Image (tube, coloured by chain):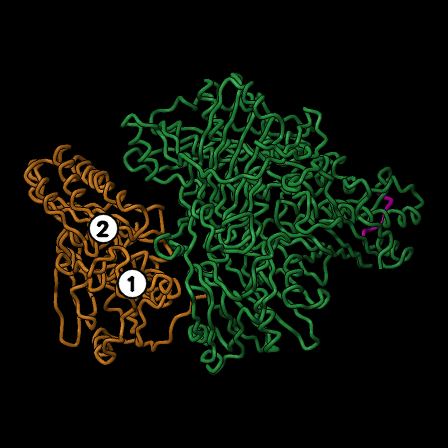
């Protein structure tokens, strides 16, 4: 079987200690929570940290506090299963519970965490292969090589943002709390992701994602739709998150549509939001938004499904997401 | 030790006359009952020891360095750094194991490690034995190989056209491994008689077995100079032969034990390089050596479904009767022969056993390409042509405005007949199968009557119950069973057959228990150990229930006869009055007069000495006498029919299959629960082949496998599994044990064409290839909207040089199964 490379495994007791350990480990350190992303990558020698610092047991990271009135604070170490089953999440943020339920499989959700999902490594069919396979194509830009096989002329890595939660967090305006030895900082999810498959986070390696803060639930609704070949297991090869704000007299005051799975970063389609703002969700505005997303989605051939198909699917998936929101508002 | 030890072949080649065939169903105590498998509890609680669970004292671990280039000469290998690594005990290369082997005598084209050339990414080049897996892995990466790259051959078309380089220095021409051309009857006359002639081109993408258990093996060369191999194999006998050959050891010094298999599906039917390698490493290190393949390496072992491009030309009369069928298949074989020659023949063998095909022509071509070798996967070479034929018949039915179920029912092959290509059909329950699924699915109210987006499709199939000929030429039994009875009433069944999850160990116990009137769980079953068990050829070609079942019946009846004689003498009752049931032997007229089963053994042992009997089975001789007649004949043919319901999302192209109705002609269920399990498993595998599975490569990136992983090689999850309504048709076949036929492979075959036909019923587009992906459905829908041909699929096939046809007059033309003498024709 595939074996993990050798590494030191540290288990801090507090967030502060975790930050200190990372400071000492330096660039060869890596945090791990559920390990569902990191360990397979290590077996494939995509990542070979010499020090792995487990934050899985930090009680501080495993709390869900607040509610839809004041906003919700979700610890980064909360497992996806805990999130899905949490009564307040289901009551006040049902779109979040539904999106999390689409991630991978039940067993992997038992291990995988909310924070891990938000930091998920970008994915690519030329990169998510073991060392021997990658040797067969002489490696790639993201690891050990100097060519992006998806776009051989490109200086940039096109590995794909593949988290189901990221587009939704961007759409609903979540904020992320990062901790390091230098202190804490709070950033908007919307500005957290970088459109580069290698350097895909605006985060220093020593920073620990500690908490996800959701805005109060009143005045907006959101939805997430996912394209994948099978009903479980698969990463999104197109994700659609949509949020519409305060519907007064039936009109949408503002809206945000974010695509996942088509670029190294979540892709906010401003034209789609603009198409929806100012009037009721109706067939015309929804189709205009879907068309705007179709035009902006430019997936490349590095995931399951043909790239043209993924682009084409932006139309029906955006439309169906918005139809679901319209349906809810009528209820 | 044994008495009454007659040889299994009773002379007429038809095997033993079975008690089973004549037994009345109401008399059966074990056969036909849903007993649990004899090994079920161990499997359920995780106690079963698979090959990778074996751990021996001082055991070393093996890693195999594989080629990362698709086609190259090996110029040099330097493994000095690997050997110098602490903990490394041995490194071997192709020079250490140069003797070629291969499953078929006609294609001995593999070596355990490549000697001078690599032929695909994944071809084994060197092997390491070290104290642990990590050390072996590190050592593997220290081996330096210098390659001189050769151009790679990636497709059938390239193989046909490329004269240099050749992947192998044998084969018909260029990179064509094998061509076949058979003609049965006057084809011109056949097409003249037709009212409608159709020509369709189909493609069936390759796919792989995907067993849960990765291949693993432990080799142990002991201090007495004998070697034992434990391996997750389906064919210990053929592995035994390959080890003796490649290790240059007397076969008597080689022992192969097939461990319980965590799934085979045909993927563990070849002798494999890693099995030979661990034995050689053990011989050198004098320590046991284990190898466990990674999932990626399992993709490289492959031997899975050949990608097949097909052209089918069919002539039919207005009533749907076939007048002639002219079928061509082009197989992408990958880098080695494997079972490929047999696979090629199988793509042309079984088209004739379902509906009457009076004249038949088959041309087949297998190409060598620089990819992992293809071989036998469930249905071996027949799902591809069956897909083509059943979709084509759906088109014929529509063209003739006939109901496809009724059209098929009208023209079924009759039981006890010989087909145009000389296959002898015995029992034939396809009519009953069609009727079951038509009724069960409410076909008449659904087909062509559902709203847009929902559809029903029907397809049928047949499969062999064991290949009529062994893989290497011999006239010995295909299966042997040895039975040992001890004086305390214990019964041990020994047989070379290999349980790969299908339940063959259980079948042995059920059959023997039935005949000796004891409980199947009282029986000790010892199988698949070349030191302890008589030869059985292996778990392939759906042969085990029929062949070992018959052998077991013969052995058990011989034991029963010994016991009966001894008990009759003791009780002073006529032998014919004795019955064996409920662990007793008793007088049927006075049931209280009798002895317990252990007492019966004591009486027999006192009279005859140690009680042991043997049984064996040889299939009946096929009526075909022409060259190529060896593939297709079988003691019996199973039949299946399926109706699939689909929902097609016209916006996304997604095809959902909510329900499948399937009927299978099993002859007689030895255990209906296991039969239904095989049927349902077949539907599951069929959904994958129909909708998503594909073994594909990046032709422009060194022919690297696109995604050798369980995540990205898309196979259905339980969420994709449909509801299945299973009907078993029981029409006992005289050649089957108790009338039983096969179920391991046949029910897979109708699934793919039934789904394709249902997609057409749902949205009016033909997807003439599998997998039927959303992209293809959308492309076909777009073509339909634009007024173009509403289909997706290939449009042309290569036009290679075919050999002159081997012409065989059909039985109807007065043929005797022999080919006509070839007459040189000069133009």
Report x, y in % for residue B144. Answer: 43, 73
Occupied quadrant, residue B765: top left
Residue A48 position, x and y percent, is 32, 72
Report the span colored magenta.
B592-597
Colour in which the image shows chain A: orange
Pick whichever, B528 or A113, lies toward us: B528
Crowding near the residue tagged with mark 2, few <14, some 14–19, many ≥20 C-alpha atoms within 10 Å:
many
Q: Against A301, is B676 above or below?
A: above
Residues at marks 1 and 2, common chain?
yes
**Position of A53 relative to B99 (above/below):** below
Q: Viewed as shown, does residue B274 lie left or right of A274? A: right
SS at mark 2? loop
Dot label at residue A140: 1
Q: Residue at x 54, y 59 (%)?
A: B45
Label number found at residue B129: none
Q: Secondary structure at mark 1?
A: loop
Q: Which chain is green?
A: B
Residue B647 in view in this figure = yes
Q: Vertical placement of B649 versus B693: above or below?
A: above
Q: In terms of depth relative to the viewer, which is nearer, B459 or A239?
A: B459
The quadrant of the picture occupied by the C terminus of chain B is: top right
Q: Nearer the viewer, residue B322 or B590?
A: B322
> On the image, numbered disc 2 is attached to which residue?
A262
Q: CA distance from mark 1 to mark 2?
A: 19 Å
């Amino acid at each position: 079987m595939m074996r993990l490379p050798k590494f030191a495994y540290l288990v801090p007791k507090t967030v502060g200690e975790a930050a200190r350990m990372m400071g000492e480990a330096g660039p060869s350190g890596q945090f791990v929570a559920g390990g569902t992303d990191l360990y397979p990558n290590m077996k494939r020698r995509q990542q070979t940290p010499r020090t792995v610092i487990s934050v899985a047991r930090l009680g501080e990271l495993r709390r869900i506090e607040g509610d839809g009135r004041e906003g919700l604070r979700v610890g980064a170490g909360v497992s996806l299963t805990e999130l899905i089953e949490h009564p307040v999440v289901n009551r006040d943020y049902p779109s979040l519970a539904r999106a999390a339920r689409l991630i991978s499989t039940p067993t992997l959700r038992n291990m995988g965490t909310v924070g891990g999902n938000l930091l998920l490594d970008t994915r690519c069919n030329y990169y998510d292969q073991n060392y021997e396979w990658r040797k067969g194509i002489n490696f790639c830009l993201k690891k050990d090589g100097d060519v992006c096989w998806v776009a051989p002329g490109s200086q940039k890595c096109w590995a794909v943002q593949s988290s189901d939660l990221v587009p939704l967090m961007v759409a609903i305006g979540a904020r992320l709390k990062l901790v390091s030895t230098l202190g804490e900082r709070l950033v908007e999810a919307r500005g957290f992701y970088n459109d580069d498959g290698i350097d895909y986070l605006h985060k220093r390696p020593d920073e620990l994602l500690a908490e996800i803060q959701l805005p109060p639930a009143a005045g907006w609704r959101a939805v997430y739709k996912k394209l994948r070949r099978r009903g479980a297991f698969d990463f999104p090869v197109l994700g659609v998150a949509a949020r519409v704000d305060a519907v007064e007299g039936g009109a949408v005051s503002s809206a945000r549509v974010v695509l996942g799975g088509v670029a190294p970063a979540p892709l906010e389609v401003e034209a789609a939001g603009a198409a929806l703002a100012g009037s009721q969700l109706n067939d015309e505005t929804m189709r205009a938004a879907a068309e705007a997303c179709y035009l902006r989605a430019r997936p490349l051939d590095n995931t399951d499904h043909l790239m043209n198909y993924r682009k084409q699917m932006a139309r029906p998936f955006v439309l169906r997401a918005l139809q679901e929101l319209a349906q809810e508002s009528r209820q | 030790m044994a008495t009454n030890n007659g040889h299994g072949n009773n002379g007429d080649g038809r095997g033993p006359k079975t008690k089973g065939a004549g037994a009345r169903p109401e008399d059966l105590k074990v056969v036909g009952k849903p007993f649990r498998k004899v090994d079920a509890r161990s499997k359920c609680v995780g106690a079963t020891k698979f090959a990778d669970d074996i751990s021996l004292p001082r055991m070393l671990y093996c890693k195999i360095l594989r080629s990362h280039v698709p086609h190259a000469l090996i110029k040099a290998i330097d493994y000095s750094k690997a050997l110098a690594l602490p903990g490394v005990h041995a490194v071997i290369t192709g020079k250490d194991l140069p003797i070629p082997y291969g499953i078929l005598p006609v294609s001995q084209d593999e070596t355990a490690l490549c000697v001078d050339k690599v032929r695909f990414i994944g071809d084994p080049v060197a092997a390491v034995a070290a104290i642990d897996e990590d050390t072996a892995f590190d050592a593997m990466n220290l081996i330096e190989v210098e390659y001189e790259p050769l151009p790679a051959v990636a497709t059938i078309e390239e193989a046909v056209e490329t004269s240099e380089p050749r992947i192998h220095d044998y084969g018909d021409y260029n990179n064509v491994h094998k061509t076949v051309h058979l003609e049965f009857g006057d084809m011109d006359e056949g097409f003249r008689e037709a009212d409608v002639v159709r020509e369709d081109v189909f493609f069936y993408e390759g796919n792989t077995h995907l067993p849960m258990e990765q291949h693993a093996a432990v080799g142990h060369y002991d201090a007495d100079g004998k070697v034992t191999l434990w391996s997750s194999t389906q064919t210990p006998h053929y592995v035994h032969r390959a080890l003796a050959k490649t290790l240059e050891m007397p076969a008597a010094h080689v022992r192969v034990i097939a461990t319980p298999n965590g799934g085979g599906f045909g993927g563990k039917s070849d002798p494999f390089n890693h099995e030979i390698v661990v034995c050689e490493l053990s011989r050198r290190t004098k320590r046991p050596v284990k190898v466990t393949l990674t999932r990626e390496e399992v993709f490289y072992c492959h031997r899975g479904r050949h990608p097949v491009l097909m052209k089918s030309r069919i002539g039919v009369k207005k009533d749907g009767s076939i007048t002639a069928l002219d079928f061509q298949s082009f197989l992408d074989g990958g880098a080695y022969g494997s079972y490929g020659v047999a696979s090629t023949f199988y793509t042309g063998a079984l088209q004739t056993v379902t509906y009457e095909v009076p004249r038949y022509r088959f041309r087949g071509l297998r190409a060598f390409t620089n990819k992992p070798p293809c071989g036998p996967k469930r249905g071996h070479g027949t799902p591809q042509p069956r897909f083509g034929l059943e979709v084509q018949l759906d088109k014929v039915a529509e063209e003739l405005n006939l109901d496809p179920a009724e059209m098929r029912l009208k023209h079924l092959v009759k039981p006890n007949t010989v087909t145009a290509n000389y296959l002898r059909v015995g029992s034939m329950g396809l009519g009953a199968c069609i009727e079951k699924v038509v009724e069960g699915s409410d076909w008449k109210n659904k087909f062509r009557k559902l709203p847009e987006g929902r559809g029903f499709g029907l397809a049928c199939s047949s499969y062999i119950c064991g290949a009529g000929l062994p893989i290497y030429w011999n006239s010995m039994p295909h299966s042997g069973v040895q039975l040992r009875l001890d004086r305390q009433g214990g019964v041990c069944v020994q047989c070379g057959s290999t349980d790969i999850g299908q339940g063959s160990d259980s079948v042995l116990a059920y059959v023997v228990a039935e005949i000796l009137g004891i409980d199947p769980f009282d029986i000790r079953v010892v199988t698949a150990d070349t030191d302890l068990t008589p030869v059985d050829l292996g778990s392939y070609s759906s042969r085990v229930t029929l062949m070992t079942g018959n052998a077991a019946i013969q052995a058990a009846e011989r034991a029963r006869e010994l016991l009966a004689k001894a008990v009759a003498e003791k009780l002073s009752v006529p032998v014919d009055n004795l019955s064996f049931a409920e662990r007793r032997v008793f007088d049927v007229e006075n049931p209280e007069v009798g002895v317990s089963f252990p007492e019966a053994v004591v009486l027999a042992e006192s009279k005859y000495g140690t009680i042991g009997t043997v049984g064996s089975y040889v299939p009946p001789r096929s009526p075909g006498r022409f060259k190529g007649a060896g593939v297709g004949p079988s003691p019996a043919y199973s039949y299946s029919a399926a109706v699939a319901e689909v929902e097609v999302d016209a916006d996304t192209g997604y095809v959902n299959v909510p329900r499948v109705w399937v009927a299978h002609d099993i002859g007689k269920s030895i255990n209906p629960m296991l039969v239904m399990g095989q049927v349902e498993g077949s539907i599951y595998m069929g959904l994958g082949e129909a909708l998503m599975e594909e073994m594909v490569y990046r032709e422009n990136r060194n022919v690297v496998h696109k995604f050798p992983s369980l995540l990205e090689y898309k196979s259905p999850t339980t969420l994709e599994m449909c509801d299945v309504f299973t009907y078993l048709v029981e029409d006992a076949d005289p050649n089957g044990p108790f009338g039983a036929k096969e179920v391991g492979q046949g029910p897979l075959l109708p699934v793919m064409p039934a789904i394709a036909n249902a997609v057409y019923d749902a949205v009016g587009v033909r997807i003439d290839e599998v997998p039927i992906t959303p992209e293809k459905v959308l492309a076909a829908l777009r073509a339909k909207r634009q007024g173009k041909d509403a289909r997706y699929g290939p449009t042309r096939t290569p036009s290679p040089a075919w050999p002159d046809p081997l012409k065989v007059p059909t039985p109807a033309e007065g043929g005797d199964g022999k080919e006509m003498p070839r007459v040189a024709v000069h133009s």
